[in-house]
Image: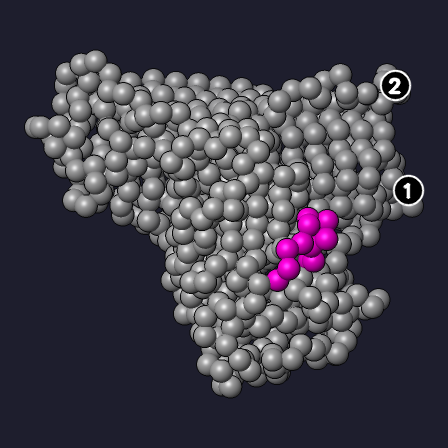
Amino acid sequence: MGLLGRLAGFAAGVAIFSALPAFDHTNPSRLRRPASTSRRPALDIRHWYAFPAGARVPFVEFNAAAGPGVRTNGYTLGPNDNFGSLAAEATGRQAVLLIGRGQYLSFTLTSPASGMTVHYALPDAPHGGGITEPLSLYVNQQFVARMSLTSKFSWLYGPYSFSKIPQLGMPGFNPPHDFYNDVRYLFSSALPAGTVVKLQVDAGDNSPWYAINTADFELVPPPIAQPVNAINAVQPPYAADNTGVNDSTRALQNAIDAGEISGRTVYLPPGTYALHAPLQVNQVTILGAGEWYTTLTGLSVEFAGHIAPASSHVNISHLALFGKVAVRRNQDGSVNGFNGGFSDSTISHIWIQNEKVGAWIVGPVVNLTLKNLRVMDLKADGVNFDAAYGGVSRSRVENSFFRNTQDDGIALWSQNAADAHDTIAQNTVDSPGLANNIAVYGSGNDVRIARNLLQDTVTRGGGINIGARFNSVPMSGTLYITQNVLNRDGQFDPGFFHGIGAIWFWPQQGDINADIQLSHNRIQASPYQAIQFLGPNSTGHVHIRDNAISRVGTYVFTEAGFGAATVRNTSASGVGIAGIYRSGCLSQFDLIDAGGNSGWNSATCASSSATAFWIFPDIVTFQNAAVGETTPPLRVAIVNRHAAWVALGAIAATPGFTLSPDPNYACGRALAPANNQNPAASGWCLLDISFTPAQPGITTGSLNIPESGGKISSVLLVGSAGGNISPSPAALAWKDRPSLPTGIPEPAIVKIKNRR
């Protein structure tokens, strides 16, 4: 399944809006009710919203931009959901920016901790490939270490499947993206509650800026000891090197083969093991000393199972897989944490980072459990159940944490057979960089998606997608979507060129005829619609009941296709525009009011975008400039998202930065209307900005872009020359901190599948 087909599908989906017949919109707010149904009061959801959604993680997470126990003299980014902005890819759509010596961010621990994981971003290198710079770590004002941060696994550009070569241009609508990575640190001893842990820019910490999104603190348990009668992979005759110096692939494979033959557990003691090829596994138990102690790393860090028939009785736990995947190469199938078939198997307590995929499970597979995983900073899916040669059935993904995948967080892809009787439960999926938090492509027979916490979709998807897509088998049976919490899911999609819902249905390649039970979910702060129905085929047999929707940016329901859904006891509050949007005032979709609903009976036929301009990137960074010399220009794109012409005011840059017309796509006095049937024909232009440093150090400024109605959007400009030696600003309390450097106007910092 290639993304070219996926993009063509987006175009096909857009085309349906003009292809459907006209509708008499004299009463667009009508809802059909079955004659036998009486209206009842709206359900008080407090009696059921006591379930714990999301993974029961071993850490306490601090969001750098919000929450108690956090102090900084840095600058707030966001909240913002526009693709191409640092805030849009952050958990909570906010981050803190540290610029210059003396800027800090501190966390006061609420419980004991001995391990810390920081979710951060650095600028890319001027010509791509990333930079590596330290950031100083303090405990109770005492210097502890200089943590090594890198952007070499971040920053992607251009059309799918993306590249590491910096570029910015239209009409591809491909902003720079994938900004974040994670770094972890194990303290020498446990820190008690009340300890203040601080990240600070010191002399020698020379990144032009550091963006910090979250810090996770946990009490790391001691290493797991070798079980009795286990094979120790470090000891002779295997003698795997756990220093990370020499390659251990052959030694570990020999130990694993011996474990398969003898039935003994294979134990990997604490240390770092370098790999250059996947480890083949079947009928074996592999145990590490713990996710913080046993680390496998290298260019091909993968456990590979057999396919058709699958490996069986594989049990792998308590270790970490740290790949070195900086860009997605779909033809490379040896850079997935777990790859292939695993029946009657359990994979648990695994830390997976900087791989292409966390776990690509190829059917036929039965009775696989993936649980207690920590999956971060990937270039494709977190977990995909791919029924390439048979279904993945009676299998589970549970109590796992996913952050910053660059495709679906969790996907069930019934490619050639049905994924059936599966459960996706109690997971947290944050900030998938491409596609959906959770997706079901085809089948869905007796599949349960329950009690998941889904947050902050970035682009090309929403929180949950139910789709007849990617040449999957038809949907059938019953799909249960229940007791999930969706925060800030959905976004303005550059392929459709309109908003995508928190939960959305897309029968792109055939009807969706499964019985879909959508109940007891909570959808809040979706930037666009809460629940969306698209064409070009029919979606039927959808039963929506006992859901709570709040603070939706545009509409509660979007009807832009064919089919029907029954809605009962579903409440909405804080609705941005209207309860229902009918594309072009069409009536091909039948939304049936079964009683007990409230807050969404209004309707409209007029589409709207939350803001006119889509501007990216939100930070322009000039690095290693020479004092008195003007740098080559960098670009900023301005795109019109409104269905009308939008005037451009006098655009200006603050001193030290020079604005000039782009030679190919210069900005005029107005931008043409958005065109959701041909996004490339929408109004857009490019600005060129250069930097001339007057002295060594960090210079900050802004690019100010006026639009209609007096609104001014701004892009942060950061220039570095001669090292990071800006003076230390005065410490500010949290409530007093600025949102941008002093003197800079407040900006509105703005915001598919070859699988294996």
Assign the C terminus to one quadrant of the image.
top left
Q: Quadrant of residue 429?
A: top right
Q: Secondary structure at mark 1?
A: loop
Q: Which mark is residue 27?
A: 1
- Is residue 150 left or right of 544 when viewed as pictured? left
* In this view, the mark in front (2 or 1): 2
Give 218 or 290, whichever is nearer the viewer.
Answer: 218
Residue 635, compared with residue 211, is above or below; it is below
Residue at the image point whose x is 78% and y is 73% from the top: 647
| Residue 350 place in picture, x, y as percent | 37, 30
The crowd level at tag 2 (other Cα within 10 Å; few <14, some 14-19, many 20+) is few
Q: Which mark is residue 40?
A: 2
Q: CA distance from mark 2 to mark 1?
A: 23 Å
Q: Amino acid at mark 1?
A: Asn
Residue 557, compared with residue 256, is above or below; it is below
| Residue 235 place in picture, x, y as percent | 13, 28
Assign the N terminus to one quadrant of the image.
top left
- Residue 212 seen in render: yes
Residue 19, compared with residue 645, is above or below; it is above
The crowd level at tag 1 (other Cα within 10 Å; few <14, some 14-19, many 20+) is few
Give the residues drawn in magenta, as a range.
Answer: 729-739
Residue at the image point whose x is 18% and y is 32% from the top: 252
- Is residue 488 left or right of 443 when viewed as pictured? right
Give 192 or 422, whichever is nearer the viewer.
Answer: 192
| Residue 658 place in picture, x, y as percent | 61, 81
Q: Secondary structure at mark 2?
A: loop
Q: Amino acid at mark 2?
A: Arg
Give 450 or 731, whichever is nearer the viewer.
Answer: 731
Q: Main secondary structure of the magenta part?
A: loop
